[in-house]
Image: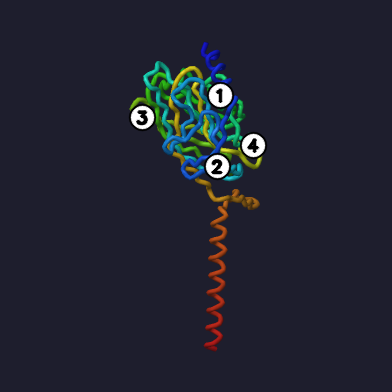
Amino acid sequence: MRTMLLAITVATTLLALPVRAETFSGSEVNLIGSAAMQNGELQLTGNLQGQGGAAWLTSPLATARSFSVTYEFSLANAGRENMADGVALVLQNKGTNAIGNVDAGSYLAYFGLDGVGSVVQTWFNNTAGLNIDGDPSRSKKAPVALGTAQLVTGSETVSYDAVAHQLSMSGTLNVDGKAFPISDSVSIDLAAKFGPSMYLGFTGATGAAFADQRITRFALTLVPEQKVVVVPGETTVVVPEEKSHTLLLIGLSVLLGLGILLVLLRRKD
């Protein structure tokens, strides 16, 4: 029954997917499906059935570069029996008009993107962790039931080490006022999965249940580009490019100082 109700609603939704540029925390995004900006917050779904939304940063990220994303979210169920269905921070290479399968709200509009995500899944699935196979239901179990809550808020920091090929997540879930720590970590080479670039964004869906699902704060930090120097017989050394420039300037300053000193010594002679 849940799938039948959703199929009717989604068929209408997918006929007219609005794509328009907005600004979210200073970043340009494309909004797909039910996604909209509400008072400076990114609303992925309203408190309605059959909604599926996505929002993507319009500028792609280099998969060879480390980064860190910090965001806050709110999933509100206004008096309904069970909360739908969850949200995900997603990395994918299908472009800024992409949206996953919303035939069931538990797919979070994420399934079908062949993406990598950090998932907070409610309804009866109750997951909160990283996923690398495109199926949100195969994420780490949440520390407490989320689908029966009235309000789930939280914050996460998702970081990627492009040299070690390590994706990690840590944060807090606040479930009806009670806090629970969450964390997860997986090994993955994003360059091998996506190629040289990828898109970062958020997805969410409701299916036949209800929830107002929002990203209320967002910040992206790009780590300075790095290079790997392999010294024979020694451990691999990772040198940030900016430090290399600093060392070069220090070296030039030392040489300049020595030159001035030599000139002064010659004058004394």
Which residue is drawn at the image coordinates 46% and 22% (left, top)? 48
Q: Secondary structure at mark 1?
A: helix
Asked where in the image residue 149 lies, by quadrant, the reply is top left
Comes first in the chain, label 1 or label 2:
1
Does label 1 or label 3 sit earlier along the sequence? 1
Which residue matches tag 2? 161
Please, what is the three-letter code of the amino acid marked with disc 2?
Asp
Which residue is tagged 4? 194
Mark 1 and mark 2: span between their CA atoms?
A: 37 Å
Mark 4 or 1, which is nearer the eye? 1
| Of the pair 185 and 233, the residue shown nearer to us | 185
Q: Amino acid at mark 1?
A: Thr
Relative image position of residue 195 (x, y in whole percent): 66, 39
Q: Residue at x 55, y 44 (%)?
A: 66
- Mark 4 and mark 2: Cα distance apart in space: 15 Å
Residue 161's image quarter? top right
Q: Contact (CB < 8 A) between labels 4 and 2? A: no
Count residues near mark 4 (Cα–Cα under 10 Å), then give few for <14, some for 14-19, many for 20+: some
Residue at (54% x, 87% y) in the render = 267
The residue that disc 1 covers is: 13
Q: CA distance from mark 3 to mark 2?
A: 28 Å
Mark positioned earlier in the residue sequence (4 or 2) = 2
Q: Quadrant of the C terminus?
A: bottom right
Could you say which is closer to the camera, residue 268 or residue 111? 111
The mark that comes first in sequence, 3 or 2, is 2
- Asked whether the beta carbons under mark 1 and mark 3 sit within 8 Å of each other, the answer is no
Q: Position of residue 132 (x, y in %)?
A: 58, 30
Q: Which numbered dot is residue 179?
A: 3
Residue 69: % across, % down: 49, 40
Q: Amino acid at mark 4?
A: Phe
- Percent position (x, y) of residue 236? 60, 49
